[in-house]
Amino acid sequence: MAHITLYRKYRSQTFEDVIGQQHVTQTLQNAIRTGKVAHAYLFCGPRGTGKTTTARLLAKALNCEQGPTPTPCDRCPMCVAIREGRAVDVIEMDAASETGIDDVRETIIENAQYMPQQARYKVYIIDEVHDLSTKAFDALLKTLEEPPPHVVFVLATTEVQRVPITIRSRCIRFDFRRASLEDLILRINTVLQREGLTAEPEAVQAIARVADGSFRDALSLLEQVLAYAGGHVDHETVRSVLGIVDEEAVGAVINAAARGDVAKALTAADDMLRRGSSVRTVLEAIAQRVRDLLYARVGALDESLPAAQLVALKAQAQHFTPDALGRMLDVLVRAQAQLRNVPQQRVLLDMAMVQIASIKRESESGASTAEVQKPTMPMAEATPPAGGAPAKSTAASTEQIKPAPPPPASATRAPKPSSEAVATLQPAPDTSEMLKLVQARWEQIIARVAERSRGGAEVLREAQPIRLEGENTVVLQFRTEFPYTQMQSEKRRHFVEQTISRVLGGREVTLRCELLRANAAPSNQHADEAGQDVEEINGEQYAREVAQTFNGYIEPEGG
């Protein structure tokens, strides 16, 4: 007899065997018991959580010789035929490979009208139903809405949002849940016991973690490990076979981040790669540890973990604030999302290590960082008040208090600002907490905008948050005129406001833009004095380049 994989060998054959989906199995059993079986069901949820298995159990319960019954015998000819996949009246259709209208017409529509040959009900199980084409869904709609009394449909999908609402509204929907770590450990231990094998608790827990909520993945991984290990499974074997990152190496990265030691973080990441781990595996392992630390820091950690692991996580979590851990997690998740688009994945890992190793140091010196990043003010200009009128410079105020002799005629003309003065922004007179936060995270905000719009990021690089008006209005001052005009679009400004709000943890922010007065376009009578500066600000080449970068700006949804 051919070898049968573990996940097929130990597929649940009764409703009682299904683990972690009692809200589904109990409801189906009650419906069968009371004779209120619906004509169509929609099973949605992550992979490997028992959708197709439960659909077969429903077919078995409806067609058992003792049924319809909520507890099929699993011994009668019909139950055995369904279990072995040879029941002619239980039709399984793979929508991933049979997507067209002809497939639906031939498999379902034309045959549904005929009475079942052997069973009590014809049961159509359509796996990955979201892969059907639009025309196929339209063709299925009428039959699904008013099927013959001897037909029951079960649609299974991992992407329910891709199933048309017209189909969803005609089905009884059940959402299958990801398996918990405890359920996965229970399932693995049960299979090991039936197979007469043993394993270390740490090894079983490691397999369950890698399975990520999927019963099928858990048994597939277990079989992979058993093929190498033989009769006994230890943690080192699991780590070696499945390519799990060494926990000590992950701890070294976290310790380096706690000290702000970029060199140590890079070295620890390099050590994991040298041991054979992939960049994605390293990022996932570090992200999982940071998530556990965040849970430990806020007191939400699963207390069922081993005592030694609990103590270690709680002790390590005390070196970080929840905000710092959240920012580290954000860096790691974004790095994972960018992997498929970056050919140099190693560089992406190094960048992530530099960022997470710098976060704690930045969070501890947030206020001082904001002060250091404040730009200096040119002596000839001062920050205008909220009303828009320019404020008088310090020198002018001093002259009003202590009148000075009238200067010679040659000195009455104001000197032309230098190129450094033109490019310099005014400082923020307001020292509120929100303004400091925006200034300290300005580069992070620009990076977030760049994820959806490189042109938008280039525009923001010409701006600087300089002060706060009211409770939440941040004033952006622009160096040059063209980016300033680009930000006058209400949709674009709203997109940037949403981005800033996300970076600040949901705090509401509005923006007001103003142009640095020293960079305003000079009148014709002074054009000869502005010279090259006017060409740099208003030149056609500069405007064309900025316009090209801004063509890729992605507007917020709904705009």
Image (cartoon, rainbow, N blue to C red):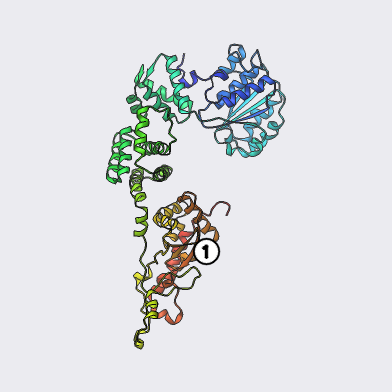
423 above or below 52?
below
Dividing the image into 4 quarters, which one contains the C terminus?
bottom right
Looking at the image, residue 74 sits to the left or right of residue 287; the answer is right
Q: Which residue is mark 1?
A: 488
Looking at the image, residue 58 sits to the left or right of residue 216; the answer is right
151 above or below 421?
above
Badge 1 element: loop
Q: Mark 1: which amino acid?
A: Gln
* Residue at figure coordinates x 42%, y 55% from the top left: 437
Across and down, in percent, residue 144 comes to 68, 31
Across and down, in percent, residue 182 comes to 46, 25
Q: Residue furthest front?
A: 401
Looking at the image, residue 404 sits to the left or right of residue 69; the answer is left
Across and down, in percent, residue 139 comes to 67, 35
Visible in this render: residue 244?
no
Q: Quadrant of residue 197?
A: top left
Across and down, in percent, residue 214 comes to 48, 28
Q: Quadrant of residue 242?
A: top left
